[in-house]
Image (cartoon, rainbow, N blue to C red):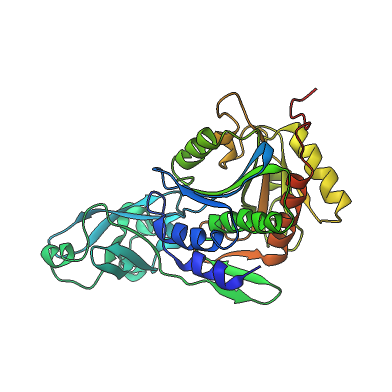
Amino acid sequence: MSLEFLKRMLNAPGPSSQETAPARVWRDEAATFADEILTDVRGNSFAVLKGGVPRVLLAGHIDEIGVIVSYIDDDGFISFAGVGGWDPQVLVGQRIRLLGKNGDVVGVIGKKPIHLMKKDEQGSTIESLWIDIGVTSRAAALEQIRIGTVGVIDAAAYELPNGRVVSRSIDNRIGAYTVLEALRLLAADRPTATVAAVATAQEEITFAGAYTAAFSFEPETAIVVDVTHCTDYPTADKKLAGEAKLGGGPVLAAGSVNSPVVHQMLLELAERENIPYTVKVNPARSATDGDAIHLSRAGVAVGVVSIPNRYMHSPNEMIQMSDVDHAAQLIAAFVRSLSAETDFIPR
């Protein structure tokens, strides 16, 4: 696995609906081993290994949460909305990288200092925050950005001990990375199936990329790779959020959108290949691209495989690379196990 490729993709700003920068990095890497590289109007990127049946889709979304400029006042202070799900407290005091008219524009999130606040003002909301890019007028701001300009927290990826990586965009560049690494393994030992890895767009806001990718590729089965909440930190509630820890291997989802056939296959393959794993339940929905893909056309047999992630939707989401490696190995083993006779209908 290439950490250099991963860090380039993690550092490329690409909030939902503006994923072009990380998508280009992903496609350039995919082109070194895939048979075909495709894109679509929704911003999805496909890397295909051509084969027979069944048709298999490996999906990981490449967008990240971000901000979008909604108003600029006369003094050049910028109001913004969240793109995706934010805890506003996380934004306070952060540097923001806006995708400006002529290149990136760095600003800072401002708020009233705590010294000047009343008690009922101390909980931040997005509406109480602003972006300051150092200009002194609306006209000066408009030379660099416009209403609708998007941005991300300005936080680079870092390697930590024990094979751990932190980044603002682990959710879910690591999913897009994992499906491409699984495809790389399959390119070295070709399956009979036709396989497409897809870096989907807009998962954080609409699932649009998942809908269009599944509709156009027409898979019989799909593996969706996303992140899931670790429960190996202080105050974690395993009764509520299940079992997942860094270094514990991929997390296999059970229930709701997950095909019981695919789930059982993944369990058996993990045991056979000595791949560590845990299981979490999705009682009603998965909150991943699987929620869209399983509904495509006449239905798709979906399995959701997740990478344990600490500090989700923050500037420093943390994963462990051994979990990514094991997830890619399991997905490749799943695809190689398929044949024209594989029956995905629960019986």
Residue 85 falls left or right of residue 287: left
| Place of residue 21 in the rendered image (x, y in percent of width and height, measured from the top left) | 41, 61
Q: Nearer the viewer, residue 169 or 198?
A: 198
Residue 25 falls left or right of residue 226: left
| Place of residue 37 in the rendered image (x, y in percent of width and height, measured from the top left) | 51, 52
Q: Nearer the viewer, residue 45 or 259?
A: 45
| Place of residue 173 in the rendered image (x, y in percent of width and height, measured from the top left) | 54, 58
Residue 192, picture quadrant: top right
Q: Is residue 290 above or below residue 24?
A: above
Q: Nearer the viewer, residue 81 or 129?
A: 81
Residue 39 falls left or right of residue 232: left
Say which residue appears at 61% left-offset and 56% top-offset: 180
Q: How many marks?
A: 0
Pick the quarter of the image with the N terminus. Answer: bottom right
Say which residue appears at 79% left-offset and 53% top-offset: 277
Say which residue appears at 65% left-offset and 33% top-offset: 220
Q: Is residue 123 visible?
A: no
